[in-house]
Amino acid sequence: MPAGMSSTGPCDLWISRGSIPGATPNFLGHAEDGFTIRWIREYDRHMNDLAGTKIAYDRSYQGREAVLTGVLTRLDWAVLLAAEPTATFGVDLPGDRGTLVMTESQGAIVWLRFPFAAKFAAVPGLVPGVRFPVCTISEESWRDLKPGAVAVPITLEAQSLFDPTVVSSAGLGWGAWTLCDFDMTALPAAGT
């Protein structure tokens, strides 16, 4: 992550159906106030007689995930419904429950693009956006569904994508986990 990463202004949310490299991104919505990204690191507590029975002797790093929250003020309902992990919104058919989101490529690639990053390129640390290769929509709130402007709060959960082709140069094994990067090349130019 770039040192002092920051963004300013609104945020566009783009999403693909299925977390498959090369999947086509579709514009899901626009958040006037941007998104909040909560980075979560997970640790296992390792107990030991030296530390006692309540306080861990040490902690073992287990990886990280992220929770993305925002309010979409302009969105494409068809794209939202197509991002479901099941074929039909509201219906779980045999085999749907228990789907392994990353392993079966049933998550979505999510791009949070900061359209004002190019406008303020002189500001240090601005990034064009953040791409999460495996996400699921965990919650959206539909309210006041009247014609015209709507505000739809949405929460997405990002997990790391496992790449078995990476081999450790230090001889520590193989495989790498990617939670996010800053690759916006799959998206059309801002403003189009």
Image (spheres, rainbow, N blue to C red):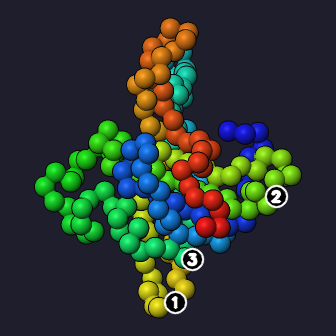
Q: Are marks 1 and 3 in contact (CB under 8 Å)?
A: no
Please give the residue where the numbered disc 2 appears in the rendered image: 120
The disc labelled 2 sits on which kind of residue? Phe
Q: Which comes before the other along the chain, label 1 or label 3?
A: 3
Please give the residue where the numbered disc 3 appears in the rendered image: 73
In the figure, 53 relative to 79: above or below? above
Can residue 39 be seen in this snapshot? no
Q: Secondary structure at mark 2?
A: loop
Residue situated furthest bottom in the rendering: 147
Q: Secondary structure at mark 3?
A: loop
In the figure, 156 relative to 174: above or below? below
Q: CA distance from mark 2 to mark 1?
A: 31 Å
> Which residue is located at x 56 percent, y 42 percent?
180
Q: Quadrant of the N terminus?
A: top right
> Which residue is located at x 47 percent, y 45 percent?
133
Q: CA distance from mark 2 to mark 3?
A: 23 Å
Q: Are marks 2 and 1 in contact (CB under 8 Å)?
A: no
Q: Does residue 148 appear left or right of residue 5 in this picture?
A: left
Residue situated furthest left in the rendering: 94
> Which residue is located at x 62 percent, y 44 percent?
182
Q: Locate residue 74, reporting x and y percent.
A: 54, 76
> Which residue is located at x 83 percent, y 47 percent?
124
Neighbour tally class for label 3: few under 14, some 14-19, many 20 plus, Cα within 10 Å: some
